[in-house]
Amino acid sequence: MPNPPRLRAAVLTATAVLLSSSVTGCSHDNDTKDEDLSGQKLSWKDCPAPSESEGGGNAPSPLPDGDEWQCATMKAPLDWAKPRGDTIDIALIRAKTSGEQSKRIGSLIFNFGGPGGSGVASLPAFGKDYEKLRTRYDLVSFDPRGVGRSAGVKCEDDAQLDEYFQQDATPDDTAEQKNLLANTKTFNSACEKHSSRILPYVRTTDAARDMNLMRQVLGDTKLHYFGISYGTELGGVYAHLFPKSVGRAVFDAVVDPTQNAEQGSLGQAEGFQLALDNFAEDCTSKTTDCPIGDTAQDVKDRIATLLKDLDSKPIPGVFPRELTQTAATSGIAQALYSKDFWEYLTEGLEQAYDGDGKVLMLLSDSMNGRNANGQYSNLVAANVSINCADDKPRYTTADVQAKLPQFKAASPLFGDYLAWGLLSCTDWSVAGAADHPDVSAPGAAPILVVGNTGDPATPYEGAKKMVDALGKGVGVEMTYKGQGHGAYDSKNKCVQSAVDGYLLDGKVPAANTVCS
């Protein structure tokens, strides 16, 4: 692919919806012009199967107690500067509380990350992990604007995306650099052609305002919130804009809000390298022989050799596509998001050394939002669109070349991949909003901020930076000494007990609590 999406995603499912030149989900009905949208009534119905833009698949299975997931559509202003102007539809999903109504706290709104992940598709996939929280909350999630059914951004079609992800994302010479820039421009132009009307309005500040409207429409005086990965940035921006409306909130897998795009990508290079180091050490330290290397360094050396070979000679992947250097790199990165995936990474590498790239390619497809039918969600389209609308810096080939040594020092394996990814907003049609988000939230209720020491995508150091940026008396830091992206879904009892205690009973853990 011309450039990788920023690897901020906690949930790598979601996205590709076909839009006309006017955005799907936009309303031009004069009857809505003067309506107070905070007073709208939602019509909850049984959920359909996720759309292609949300990743496809089957309708969500019933909840453990037999209740059905419910879906609805909320109208929000297309342009929050014109709150009584044209509207877009925001897709919502909920699981009503399983407990007594007298003990119900309200709605607990989830954002699982990305940016670009479909909350409508993700919440049912992870719902069983949050059953305890359902005893006192309605569990709610949504497709943020630009994602899935919420005026989802459309760039290229499935065939074009297959070609897009086969491109060389780490050019070695001038000709390959020109090809990279040309492909980037083609992709970005397709976004402008198909989705120009929504692109200026997919900033994180817009999504935060949507959440505040959602809070009102759901009937809550405070926003109770669970944000994961990019969802922590969204939650921080919400807290900055509406500090007095923050209820009980948890940030897990925390984005460093002080970093610009370059600093964030460099941090990810270090984070994914750390995760790779931990994976290699884990494989070679077991009592049985590690099938992909004799020592941790041997494992990494063999991976580096594989990637170098794939640059000039791809191997069969998922027919008719081949496993390229770029696809293999993104597949390895995907497997490092969770320790549960390490066995698949071992299997994929073992097979790739024998000339079979299928497993690594399936992992890469998961990273890019491609399902088994060859259909793409709009994960990457939304990811690029939201990042480029948020991030002010625009980088050139010369910028990347100057930064390459630093990126490669941070990660011999992922450094150049993430450095060249900085070009993703080159020639973007909408100016970026800021160098980094403002999350200062004086006066907000306590926000529990959980960092994982082994997190590849949102390195641990970001948790402390988020706490400091939120301001004195707001952020409460907690540490999980573990592996993978995020902490709560690791099933660690210490983490879950602390998070549940705050969300369910209002018990704020002691600052700097450590779980292992």
Image (cartoon, grey):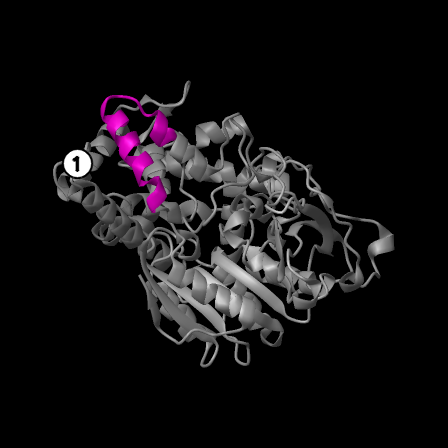
Query: In the image, is 357 to the left or to the right of 319?
Result: left
> In this rendering, is residue 129 above or below 340?
below
> Is the C terminus in the top left, top right, bottom left or bottom right quadrant?
bottom left
Q: Residues within 10 Å of mark 1 (few under 14, many from 20)?
A: few
**Residue at coordinates 57% horizontally, 37% vertically from top-left?**
16
**Residue at coordinates 40% horizontally, 42% vertically from top-left?**
4
**Residue at coordinates 77% horizontally, 61% vertically from top-left?**
37
Instruction: Decide if residue 284 is in sight here.
Output: yes
Amino acid type of the residue tagged 1 in the rendering: Thr
Q: What segment is highlighted magenta in the picture? A: 339-361
Instruction: Decide if residue 176 is in sight here.
Output: no
**Residue named by callout 1:** 288
Provide residue 208's location: percent of width, then percent of height.
60, 62
* SS under mark 1: loop
Q: Is residue 140 magenta?
A: no
Query: In the image, is 113 to the left or to the right of 318?
Result: right
Residue in front for this viewpoint, 30 or 74: 74
Residue in front for this viewpoint, 335 or 421: 335
Provide residue 480's location: percent of width, then percent of height.
34, 62
Provide residue 260's location: percent of width, then percent of height.
40, 61
